[in-house]
Amino acid sequence: MKDNYLNTYNNLIKLTRDKSLYLNLNKEETFTDRLIFLLLILAFFFKNYKSHNNKIKLQQIHDFIFKQIEISIREIGYGDVSINKNMKKYINFFYNILNKIDNWDNYDLEKKCEILSKIIDSPKNISFYTNYFDKLCIFYKNNTLNYFAKDIEEFKI
């Protein structure tokens, strides 16, 4: 069962490796930028699949992914106190993103740009990101939750 969650996690990580996400920043990418994009991609993932009666599975995916984030932070070399503090900050940030994008499909371009400009640090072209996340929503809608349980070679968003 955890292999499915590992594949889901790895597939979401693959989405964060899209070079265009980082080429559209006005600065060099950092661990924090990669984490912000992961949290955004994850938030849209949960937003899309929450209504599919998969609450237990989604909770398990959530727990697994945040455990993986914690492991990554430990590997970087943060201490226990710092890890707890940062994990609390990241989880709160994630729920803040979820709250802001809950009605994403009903927002106009200006509102979407406003939301993302508060989340993404130093974007060159914020409309690039609104377009990207609109396409990501369509991609999620066109695929089932089980689609992410297998290893996906390449994403066509």
Image (tube, rainbow, N blue to C red):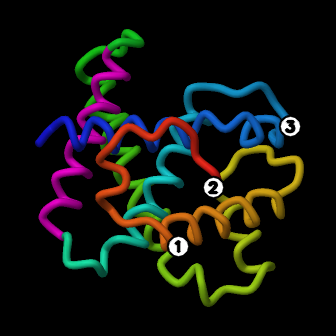
Residue for point 32% across, 35% down: 85
Q: Main secondary structure of the magenta part?
A: helix
Instruction: Using the numbered discs, state the Cα–Cα distance from disc 2 to disc 1 in whole angstroms.
Output: 10 Å
Which residue is under mark 3?
26
Where's residue 46, x and y in %? 37, 65
Residue 10 quadrant: top left
Whether 127 is drawn above or below 75: the answer is: below
Labelled disc at residue 119: 2
Dot 2 or dot 1: first in sequence order is: 1
Where's residue 129, x and y in %? 74, 58
* Type of amino acid at the residue the image marks with label 3: Asn
Identify the secondary structure beneath mark 1.
helix
Labelled disc at residue 100: 1
Verify CB contact (< 8 Å) between mark 2 and mark 1: yes
Horizontal arrangement in the rendering, residue 120 relative to residue 6 (left or right): right
Residue 26 quadrant: top right
Dot 2 or dot 3: first in sequence order is: 3
Residue for point 48% across, 64% down: 44
Determine crowd level at label 2: few under 14, some 14-19, many 20+ residues with C-alpha closer than 10 A: some
Observer able to see residue 77: yes
Verify CB contact (< 8 Å) between mark 2 and mark 3: no
* Type of amino acid at the residue the image marks with label 1: Lys
Q: Which range is magenta?
A: 55-74
Labelled disc at residue 153: none
Instruction: Using the numbered discs, state the Cα–Cα distance from disc 1 to disc 3 in whole angstroms.
Output: 24 Å
Whether 114 is drawn above or below 116: the answer is: below
